[in-house]
Amino acid sequence: MPRALVIGGSGQIGRYLVPQLLDSGHDVLAVSRIPRSSRHAGLHWLQGDVFVALPALPELHMIFSLGPLDGFAAWLARARLEGKPRIVAFGSMSASSKRDSPDPGERALAQSLRQAEQALADAAARADLPWTLLRPTLIYGAGLDRSLTPLARRAARWHVFPLLPAARGLRQPVHAEDLATLCRAAINRDAAVGRSFDLGGGERLAFATMLERIRQSLPGWTLPVPVPLAALHLALRLAGGSGIRHGLGPGMLARLGTDLLADDGPARQHLDWSPRPFHPRAATWVPPPLI
């Protein structure tokens, strides 16, 4: 029975990947920072943190890193693993999309992501382990993201939904379940070894259109309130540092008119990547249960 280590098993992608692995006959060791238990015979929760330490591990056939890439790369560099497990790890398209951001904090984030990618490649090379890096765009679909889900929940609670009709930058939101399915494809493809793949969802749509579809997915009624971009720029100036802490920064505003798209042709060619279009439903904003 193949044994898989899933780091971040309780996160967005892990909520879909762990059941898929169990259904396909894998023995799964899932890592979480807090204690968890399962009644599934093939699932074993481990408490650990890649930034600190993981418990002793048996021989592994594959490793899926679904959490912070820098922590995983650092853990891999100091780990002494039995066997030669194949690795699929997640980075982020922010490594490129925020590289030239007017926000220095976002530029620093992009640099740290690129450094983590190099650290992963170096650690895997030293251990002679095959690796694949996946770099998705905006992830949704598990009710755990920090961008679309909070917006949807606030709108459902207050029955008011802000719309940005002038935000014409294109987006490719990608469903977490599609990424979980891709993990299982990538782990077995020799053509994926030693490569990075950018990943977008199955549809390119304007930011404003994405917001309207979120509004339409909500149960009950919401009042659509168009917000001019000039009002957001004014709010940012008035909010100062507190606006940046709440996600309203110059980088975010600048990207509303910029296309943030993934060149996922290589993933479609080598990994049969075929993601769904963006049509959220009310259940999209609720986390799937842990098994």
Image (cartoon, helix red, strand yellow):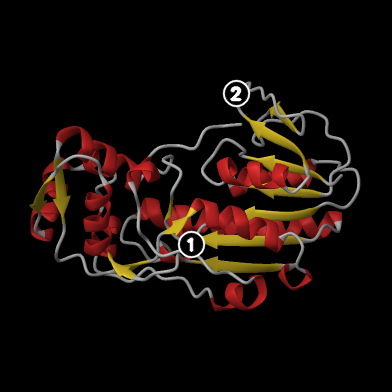
Query: Observer-nearest residue: 223 or 79?
Result: 223
Secondary structure found at label 1: loop
Q: Is residue 116 visible in the rendered structure shown here?
A: no
From what the image shows, is residue 265 above or below residue 216?
A: below
| Dot 1 alpha-carbon crowd within 10 angstroms: few under 14, some 14 to 19, many 20 or more | many
| Amino acid type of the residue tagged 2 in the rendering | Ile
Q: Residue at horizontal 19%, vertical 43%?
A: 240
Q: Residue at horizontal 84%, vertical 47%?
A: 2
**Number of numbered discs on residues:** 2
| Dot 2 alpha-carbon crowd within 10 angstroms: few under 14, some 14 to 19, many 20 or more | few
The residue to which callout 1 is attached is 93
Query: Observer-nearest residue: 103 or 89?
Result: 89
**In the figure, is residue 222 to the left or right of 73?**
left
Residue 161 picture location, percent across and down: 16, 46
State yes or no: discs 1 and 2 in contact (Cβ < 8 Å).
no
Residue 291 occupies quadrant: top right
| Amino acid type of the residue tagged 1 in the rendering | Met
Residue 115 picture location, percent across and down: 59, 57
Residue 149 occupies quadrant: top left
Query: Observer-nearest residue: 221 or 242?
Result: 221
The residue to which callout 2 is attached is 34
